[in-house]
Amino acid sequence: MPTPLQPPAERALARPRRRRLAAVAALGALLAVGAAALLGLRPPAPLRADAPVEAFSAERAYTHLETIAAQTHVAGSPAAERARRHIEEALRKLGLTPETQDTVGGEAGQLSGGAGGATLARVRNVVARLPGTAPTGRIFLVAHYDSVQVGPGGNDDAAGTSAILEVARALTAGPRPRNDIVFVLTDAEEACLCGAAAFAADHPLAADGGVVLNLEARGSSGPVIMFETSRRNAGLVDVFGRAAPHPVGTSFAVEIYRLLPNDTDFTAFLDNGFTGLNSAYIDGAALYHTPLDTPAAVHRGSLQQHGDNTLALAREFGAVDLAGLPAGGDATYFPVPGGLVRYPGWLTWPLTVLALLAVAALGWLSRRRGYLSWPRLGAGLGLVLVPLLVAPAGAYLLWAAVTTIRPGYATLLDPYRPLWYRLAVLALAAAVLFGWYALTRRRTGPAALAVAGLGWLAVLGVPLALLAPGGAYLTTLPALAGAVAGLTALAVRAESPVAVVAVTAGAAVGVLLLLPTVVLLFPALGMAMGAVAALVAVLLGLAALPVLDLLHPAAGGQRGMAALRARRAAAVPALAAALGTVICAGVGLAVDRFDAAHPVPTHLMYALDADTGTARWLSAETDPQPWTDRYVDGPARVGGQFPLLGGEPLRAGPAQPAALPPPRLDLLTDTGPAGPRTLRVRLLPQRPVRLATLGVDPATATVRGATVAGRPVEVGAGTDFSVVFHAPPPEGIEIELRVEPVGGGAVRLRATDGSDGLTGLPGFRPRPPGVGVVGAHDSELVLVTRTYTL
Ligand SMILES: [Zn+2]
């Protein structure tokens, strides 16, 4: 008589040899599915310069990339001007007539800061149009050509820019598309998305909107992920799925991205009513925004994928009737080997309910057949929470331990060589799952645990469907597949191998959907949030529980020594995985040491107060590196003096005052000393700077209105008001302020400007090899401030 807790697959395999064979076959099948899923994420091989003219060649794009990212080219710098001229020249050579939109742009989404400030920039966008034969609308291929202030931006975003130049070449070499294709290489993305905002809001070609394909990079390698779309994306995603040759994208990424504090040029286009797709590669994030983001650091396969996809999408969007693109709702989509699965978002709830019903049916039938009891299923549902909580907590503690040993990781988005740490997190999740299973399986029974695991997957679909519908497929579909597989296994003859095939197929769905998710989550969130990947890894394990169960000796029946041996055997996978965790973390620490090519990041700024003639070193490092420690000691508050630095906690130390002239503030006109005043001033930096700011001391006046460089800016409800202007022109910035002086007295204004690079400052010693620069927008910033009373 079979023991009451054996599922059919297990009864079919009552003989140990058959069971071992089934375990090998089923696990082999899952490994093959997993390998295929991961291979599908690999970027293509780069094409050489002698590739056919109609094809995209990473090597051809790379020649542009080397020129554009030859040096740091932050917005407004001479190097940025050289990059701009190269882009114009390259487009002109294709027979296009590029023009430069030279204007002032405000920050995306607003011409003001909600907190009482406005951010603007003088921008120079390069724009060229390939006219369509019978246009139904416009396609915009967008990348930003400016870099950050401390690095040449080889990946971010010279890669996107040069990919567009090579796409433009391929498009002009072929038959003319039906729709207009507009190439937009924007300026000042790093500063404030101001170039894209100026184009989207003001350029005549942007007046009717259209479809934007934005190309970005937040790292140096890995698959290009289509991670953001406009709302109601079903039609766009359908084109992406059928046209892009390497369509890596998931509706879950859209949901994740909305939670992250990142923005790209795409935001500026969305704010102005455009539709479109946003793509980036994101692995190798240790280089992001640092001096190490050089042309040599660009992974040619990722560049090839960017170009392949963009060229194919430009051709397809260039050919369809854009007016007829179904707006529909949002689609659910995810990559599988060989393509992109997509279905309408309205199916999310029906599938969620179906998964719940299927798992409930499986539980009910399993009980009727005597494989589980209600109390055991209840216990299983409670016990499944243990790995779901313990694995993420363990991943968190693991990374806390690693950063204690190597504090330099704290300021890195991801380590330089994260592979072993990622494997450590996966081994940890496996150790927790295997250990938990070995401890609970005998008492609760494999059927109760398997049904409970599927139950949690199905239940988690509900909050996902509510809060992040694009991610609901991650738990709903594996639960549904697992439940259908279980019902199939219960329906066939107990001895039939169909039962094993069915549960393996059910688990394969979980592997197919969740393994790429785990692999993409690591670079997306970084090791500090490895807990999320651990959680998804446990979900994958729960979906595959019936297959993992084959690793265990048949349940029940054994007594005495046999039972003891069985329990010992069950502990082996968990112990092996635990050992794997320690080994992987140890190898990670050994492999990923800081050295000259992989320097420990440090953050340092310099601030000179021209009113008092005093200077300070400032750092955003909370636990300063030894190099930084020589410059800063205690925490400091500088928000009052340097509103630009905002409320971030900083450390400060005394510095020698440098001979740097403060920005000049010239009063042009003034409506009078008393009552409401209108002050027209010119803010004029006296040295080459990246940005200049002007703030009004709220103790002396309330700002009622402001115009900057001829543009009215909104004044927030708060009393603080300041303007940040990036890439100020040589003639300075004209600012008109309508103020109500407090008590009718004089108005105090603070003028500040900022340049980049600490070399040459008194007391500064260049970094030794092995010490690098944090990839932040205020790294190496040199601020000079002065107050003026008018
Ligand atoms: Zn960037």
Image (cartoon, rainbow, N blue to C red):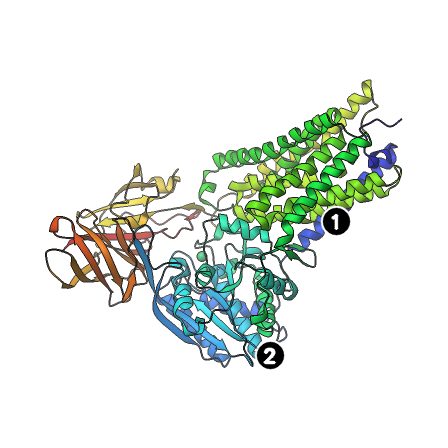
Vertical side of 682 occupied by 740: above or below: above
**Label 2: which secondary element:** loop
Residue at 48% from the left image edge and 65% from the top image edge = 274
Rendered location of residue 416, percent (x, y): 52, 48
Vertical side of 37 occupied by 711: above or below: below
Q: Quadrant of the C terminus?
A: bottom left
Pick the front one: 276 or 390: 276
Pick the front one: 541 or 671: 671
**Label 1: which secondary element:** helix
Rendered location of residue 569, percent (x, y): 76, 28
Judge whether residue 33 can be spotted in this image: yes
Which residue type does callout 2 highlight? Gly
Picture quadrant of residue 710: bottom left
Rendered location of residue 538, percent (x, y): 64, 38
Residue at 46% from the left image edge and 79% from the top image edge = 92
Per the image, the residue denoted by label 1 is 32
Rendered location of residue 226, percent (x, y): 57, 58
Per the image, the residue denoted by label 2 is 174
Which residue type does callout 1 highlight? Ala
Q: Quadrant of the N terminus?
A: top right
Instruction: Rate crowding at label 1 as few (under 14), some (14 to 19) or many (20 or more) other CA atoms within 10 Å.
Output: some
Apparent side of residue 267 relative to residue 629 in the rendered image (left or right): right
Residue at 46% from the left image edge and 47% from the top image edge = 599
Q: Can you tell me whether the CB of the residue at mark 1 lies under 8 Å from the nearest atom of ligand 1?
A: no
Check residue 273 in the rendering and tell me which mark sits there, or answer none.
Answer: none
Apparent side of residue 572 relative to residue 260 in the rendered image (left or right): right
- Name the quarter showing ligand 1: bottom left
